[in-house]
Amino acid sequence: MLGSTQQGLACEYGTGACPSTTTCAWLPNSPGEGLCRPRCVNGACPSSSQICCTQPNGAPYCNSFCY
């Protein structure tokens, strides 16, 4: 069972597909798995409580912390 920090909409396994304005935040300890998070656009996030996270194999995403 996932902990509260990992709950949310999962990306499509393997492809990382997410709906509309979200991007896949790949989980470092789970190859091929990730969670859909808001996109980080020009270093900015829709919520001021979130930070922009970069990742080696995907688009920047917004979250309260970086995986």
Image: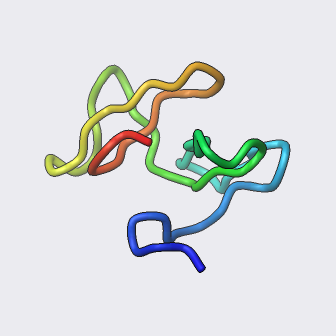
* Colour pattern: rainbow
Percent across and percent down for residue 20 are 62, 52
**Farthest bottom residue in view:** 1
**Nearer-the-camera pick, 30 or 57:** 30
Q: Is residue 32 above or below residue 1?
A: above
Quarter of the rendering containing residue 61 = top left
In the visual, does 56 lie left or right of 61? right
Q: On the picture, is 24 further left or further right than 3?
A: right
Q: Nearer the viewer, residue 46 or 49?
A: 49
Image height of 3 relative to 63, above or below: below
18 left or right, relative to 27: right
Residue 35 horizontal/vertical position (percent): 58, 55
Percent from the top left, x then y, of residue 18?
68, 52
> Does 67 sit above or below residue 58?
below
Query: Which residue lies at the image location 22% right of the left edge and 51% below the top edge?
Result: 47
Nearest the viewer among 59 and 28 is 28
Residue at x-position 28% and y-position 39%: 45
Q: Residue furthest right?
A: 14
Where on the picture, by quarter, is residue 9?
A: bottom right
- The percent position of residue 44, horizontal first and vertical second, equals 27, 31
Quadrant containing the C terminus in the rendered view:
top left
Q: Residue at x 16, y 51 (%)?
A: 49
Viewport quadrant of the N terminus: bottom right
Residue drawn at point x = 74 percent, y = 44 percent: 16
